[in-house]
Image (spheres, helix red, strand yellow):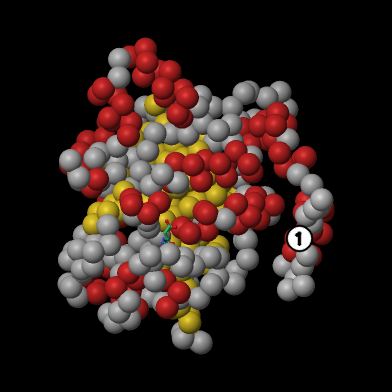
């Protein structure tokens, strides 16, 4: 069996392990069990008709005396490209809108409040080719582009916050960026968050296409909680997650595009560790499919959500389009912070002082020698 035919770790364990061992293995691998969500039958039927995987899980928190639960639902969407990469650009974008639109409709049936799509969701992952044309034509204005207009309609129609990661073209200076547009459930553009770190690994030749983000570590206050977006390669940088958390993020989305041979062993760890270290929820989303115009590898999906107590949902499929619906009580963040106190015990002033010295060209490492 080739790597791109392997459906998921969870399915493999379920089909090969006896029940009792399976429970123990899952506990060790995934932490406290996430309960399955009862999803409406109309949603399950629609997902099956539209040929995508639909999974739902719930993270619980203790009922407090002074605060009401803050239960919300997030939706993570992973998908392959719809049309071949040599189809006309506008047809490719429109086909992707149609596909994601039909998945968002199901997210609405499941009561999703905040939905996030994968990195540069309207386009094939073309940066690996090194060709500029026609791929730069997929870039759009974050505020005025067709994709943002499309998402604004979805947001209003379904009363849903939409996080839409696109290739952004800023017309004024002709600059391209890798940007997540955050659209409020009112339909207004709340703002945008540009990818902080650009990969310099293998065929991820992204630095020739767009610039390092300049929007800092913005957090968006939505009706359903404070959210932030750490795009793809930023997940390898613990300080990047940390800065979103320092600005108050309760949920950090990580829309990604990454392939198996490169990053799969790291995938289940990085966003999960960020949830633990920062007392917040993290949502890791990866596309599926194989880019055929370039020998690049298989995008392995496996989108999942991690909670501050170290537990996580099972991943979506490695091969199929999918929607992961996750209910979370945001009160869990403070409950875990009170228990473990990582943020409270962090020696930030000390780190800041040492870091300020460490980034200087004349820095002398603090090493004792005999
Ligand atoms: N899109 C992107 O940044 N990919 C880089 C590879 C990775 O971070 O796994």
Q: Residue 202: x, y in percent?
A: 38, 65
Farthest residue toward the front? Answer: 370
What residue do we see at 46% from left, 65% from top?
Answer: 199
Q: Residue 11: x, y in percent?
A: 28, 30
The answer, for residue 192, to whether it is visible in the render is no
What residue do we see at 71% from left, 23% from top?
Answer: 65
Determine whether 180 is above or below 90 in the image.
above
- In which image quadrant can residue 292 be found? bottom left
Residue that carries the numbered disc 1 in the rendered image: 365
- In which image quadrant can residue 124 be found? bottom left
> Between residues 327 and 269, which one lies in front from this camera angle?
269
What residue do we see at 22% from left, 36% from top?
Answer: 45
Farthest residue toward the top? Answer: 20
* 86 to the left or right of 179: left
Mark 1 burial class by Cα count in 10 Å: few <14, some 14-19, many 20+: few
Determine whether 86 is above or below 117 in the image.
below
What residue do we see at 39% from left, 34% from top?
Answer: 314
Quadrant where the N terminus is found in the figure: top left
- Residue labelled 1 has its Cβ within 8 Å of some atom of ligand 1: no
Determine whether 221 is above or below 265 in the image.
below
Q: How many marks?
A: 1
Q: Tag 1, which secondary structure?
A: loop
Ligand 1 lies in which image quarter? bottom left
The answer, for residue 86, to whether it is visible in the render is yes
Q: Residue 151: x, y in percent?
A: 39, 61
Q: Residue 105: x, y in percent?
A: 32, 48
Determine whether 293 is above or below 5 in the image.
below
* 290 to the left or right of 165: left
> Between residues 96 and 205, which one lies in front from this camera angle?
205
């Amino acid at each position: 069996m080739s790597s791109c035919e392997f459906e998921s770790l969870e399915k493999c364990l379920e089909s090969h392990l006896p029940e009792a061992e399976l429970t123990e293995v899952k506990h060790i691998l995934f932490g406290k069990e996430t309960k399955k969500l009862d999803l409406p039958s109309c949603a399950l039927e629609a997902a099956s008709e539209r040929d995508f995987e639909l999974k739902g899980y719930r993270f619980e928190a203790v009922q407090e005396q002074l605060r009401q639960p803050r239960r919300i639902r997030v939706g993570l969407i992973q998908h392959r490209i719809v049309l071949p990469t040599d189809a006309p650009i506008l047809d490719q974008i429109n086909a992707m809108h149609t596909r994601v639109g039909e998945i968002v409709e199901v997210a609405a049936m499941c009561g999703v409040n905040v939905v996030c799509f994968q990195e540069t969701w309207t386009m094939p992952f073309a940066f690996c080719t090194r060709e500029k044309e026609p791929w730069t034509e997929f870039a759009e204005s974050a505020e005025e582009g067709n994709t943002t207009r499309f998402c604004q309609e979805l947001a209003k129609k379904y009363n849903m916050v939409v996080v839409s990661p696109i290739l952004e073209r800023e017309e004024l200076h002709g600059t391209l960026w890798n940007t997540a547009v955050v659209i409020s459930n009112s339909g207004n553009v709340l703002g945008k968050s540009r990818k902080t770190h650009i990969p310099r690994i293998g065929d991820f030749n992204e630095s020739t296409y767009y610039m390092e983000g300049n929007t800092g570590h913005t957090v968006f206050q939505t009706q359903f909680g404070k959210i932030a977006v750490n795009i793809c390669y930023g997940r390898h940088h613990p300080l990047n997650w940390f800065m979103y958390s320092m600005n108050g993020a309760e949920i950090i989305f990580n829309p990604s595009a990454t392939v198996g041979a490169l990053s799969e062993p790291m995938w289940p760890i990085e966003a999960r560790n960020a949830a633990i270290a920062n007392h917040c929820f993290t949502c890791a989303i990866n596309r599926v499919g194989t880019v055929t115009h370039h020998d690049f590898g298989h995008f392995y999906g496996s989108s999942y959500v991690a909670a501050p107590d170290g537990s996580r949902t099972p991943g979506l499929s490695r091969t199929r389009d999918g929607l992961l619906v996750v209910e979370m009580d945001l009160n869990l963040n403070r409950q875990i912070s009170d228990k473990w106190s990582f943020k409270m015990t962090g020696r930030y002033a000390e780190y800041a002082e040492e870091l300020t010295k460490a980034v200087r060209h004349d820095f002398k490492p603090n090493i004792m020698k005999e």
